[in-house]
Image: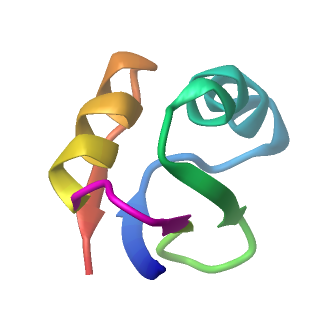
Amino acid sequence: MATIKFKTNINCSSCVAKVTPFLNKKEGITSWSVDIDNPDKILIVETNDLSAEDIVKTVKRTGFEAEPI
């Protein structure tokens, strides 16, 4: 299992609520969380087989940005 971290612009609980259905539905994500208290709004994703690019594309579909760190 891989842990991939991203800097995002998901900055509040309402924003987290917007991405939740997309990340929960995404095949290959075993768990995820967003640290909205961190200045960089860190998204942490646990996955068995997805690349960082797969996750970035999923986040972008929700209207937010994600950059691997």
Left or right: 37, with 55 as reference point: right
Quarter of image, res 56: top left
Q: Position of residue 61 (x, y in %)?
A: 35, 18
Residue at the (42%, 80%) spot, across then down: 2
Question: Is residue 44 found inside the magenta-colored segment of the image?
Answer: no
Q: Position of residue 37 (x, y in %)?
A: 75, 74
Q: Position of residue 11 (x, y in %)?
A: 63, 50
Q: Is residue 53 above or below residue 24?
A: below
> How many numbered marks, from 0 up?
0
Residue at the (69%, 21%) spot, across then down: 21
Q: Quadrant of the C terminus?
A: bottom left
Q: Position of residue 17 (x, y in %)?
A: 78, 29
Residue at the (33%, 59%) spot, across then down: 49
User: Farthest left residue?
Assistant: 53
> Which secondary structure class fits the magenta region best?
loop
Of residues 67 and 9, the one drawn nearer to the viewer in this rendering: 67
Structure colour scheme: rainbow
Left or right: 61, with 12 as reference point: left
Q: Is residue 50 above or below residue 12?
A: below
Q: Is residue 35 above or below residue 61?
A: below
Left or right: 46, with 17 as reference point: left
Q: Which residues are magenta?
A: 46-51
Of residues 41 and 5, the one drawn nearer to the viewer in this rendering: 5
Residue at the (66%, 59%) spot, across then down: 32
